Image (tube, rainbow, N blue to C red):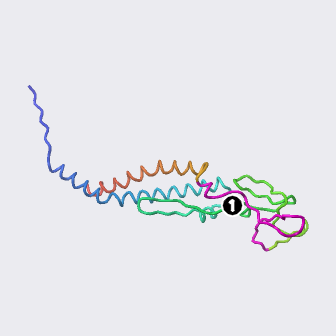
Amino acid sequence: MAFSTLEIDASQVEHLAELFKLAKQKAPAAIGRAVRRTGDMTATRVVRSLTAQTGLKRPVIVRAVKKKPSGSTYALKSRGGDVSLKYFGARETRKGVSAAPWNHRRVFTGTFIKGGRFPHRVGLDLGGQVFKRTGAARVPIVKQRSGLFIPTEMISGATKDTFLRSVATILPARLQHEIAAILGGHA
């Protein structure tokens, strides 16, 4: 007849209890670190995606998207209105100004950046803005906008997908890393 014996060493359980106490004390800080790192990595990906989606230059997007880390939360915020055509690589042609909102170049008929007759156009010192006359007279003129709103673009299309995918893949790995660092450092 064979006998088996299983023994439990109480010192091993006490050691685990100490690890769990330590982990419980350090867990909020570890979660915060994981969220901040995930937020920073996601922000980089969102800026890259938003640049491709809108057609705006990267520095414009970086200025528009603000990072707001706070404890165990991390927000990407943007505000603003209809972006001027000047930010989309606007250049003047005989028919009007060519610009590329949403990374799609087209001519905005009847608009202008410079003054005078072609081909001897001169700058108007209006900051590179694109204008259009509202009537037959020389004035009044109105600054032209693209119809693109950065806050709206942030929560739609490829940028939204990039954000959700990044958080879903990066956050669990960062949490696992931070918890392993807590437990591994005192095991």
Identity of the residue furthest to the left in this view:
1
The residue carrying pointer 1 sits among few (fewer than 14), some (14 to 19) or many (20 or more) residues within 10 Å by Cα, namely few
Q: Position of residue 119 (x, y in %)?
A: 90, 66
Of the 4 image quadrants, the one containing the C terminus is bottom left
* Residue 20 relative to residue 166: left or right: left
Quadrant of the rendered image containing residue 34: bottom left
Quadrant of the rendered image containing residue 71: bottom left
Q: Position of residue 102 (x, y in %)?
A: 69, 53
* Residue 94 relative to residue 75: left or right: right
Magenta stretch holds residue 40: no
- Would you place residue 117 above or below residue 9 in this image? below
As shown in the figure, which amino acid type bears the numbered disc 1?
Asp
* Residue 187 relative to residue 66: left or right: left
Q: Identify the residue at horizontal 56%, vertical 48% (top origin).
A: 161
Badge 1 element: strand
Q: Identify the residue at horizontal 41%, vertical 53% (top origin).
A: 174
The stretch in magenta equals: 125-154
* Residue 52 relative to residue 162: left or right: right
Quadrant of the rendered image containing residue 129: bottom right
The residue that label 1 is drawn on is 82
Query: What count of labels does the image hold?
Result: 1
Q: Position of residue 24 (x, y in %)?
A: 29, 56
Identity of the residue furthest to the top in this view:
1
Q: Position of residue 4 (x, y in %)?
A: 12, 33
Q: Say which of 37 and 152 sits in front.
A: 152
Identity of the residue furthest to the bottom in this view:
125
Of the 4 image quadrants, the one containing the N terminus is top left
Q: Identify the residue at horizontal 10%, vertical 28% (top origin).
A: 2
